Amino acid sequence: MTGLLDTLRRTARLMVGLPDYDAYVLHRATHHPGEPVMDRTAFFRDRQEARYGGKNGGRCC
């Protein structure tokens, strides 16, 4: 049951635009070992900036 709840939680977050920090950490550890990993706050700000106010002037498309 816990696995189902985790999956639903991740899905709901992705639906509203909140990427999964735990998946990010796992990806960094697997594919980029030894490189720095952003903390949860920095990760959230980075994803928010990329989505709403990054280099494309805040446009989503």
Image (tube, helix red, strand yellow):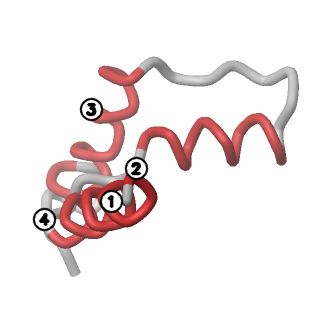
Mark 1–mark 3 Cα distance, whole angstroms, equals: 18 Å
Q: Which quadrant of the figure has residue 5?
A: bottom left
| Circle 3 SS class | helix
Q: Position of residue 19 (x, y in %)?
A: 34, 53
Amino acid type at circle 2 is Asp
Disc 3 designates what residue? 45
Disc 4 designates what residue? 16
Q: Earlier in the sequence, mark 4 or mark 3?
A: 4
Q: Position of residue 60 (x, y in %)?
A: 18, 72
Seen in the picture, residue 32 relative to 16 is either above or below; the reply is above
| Circle 2 SS class | loop
Seen in the picture, residue 14 relative to 29 is either above or below; the reply is below
> Which of the image's four quarters has the N terminus?
bottom left
Q: Earlier in the sequence, mark 4 or mark 1?
A: 1
| Circle 4 SS class | loop
User: Residue at image x 78%, y 24%?
Assistant: 35
User: Are the two marked residues, 3 and 2, in contact with CB atoms closer than 8 angstroms?
Assistant: no
Amino acid type at circle 3 is Arg
Query: Label 1: few (<14), some or many (≥20) within 10 Å?
Result: some
User: Residue at image x 26%, y 57%?
Assistant: 9
Q: Which of these two is toward me, 59 or 5?
A: 5
Q: Earlier in the sequence, mark 3 or mark 2?
A: 2
User: Residue at image x 86%, y 21%?
Assistant: 34
Mark 4–mark 3 Cα distance, whole angstroms, equals: 15 Å
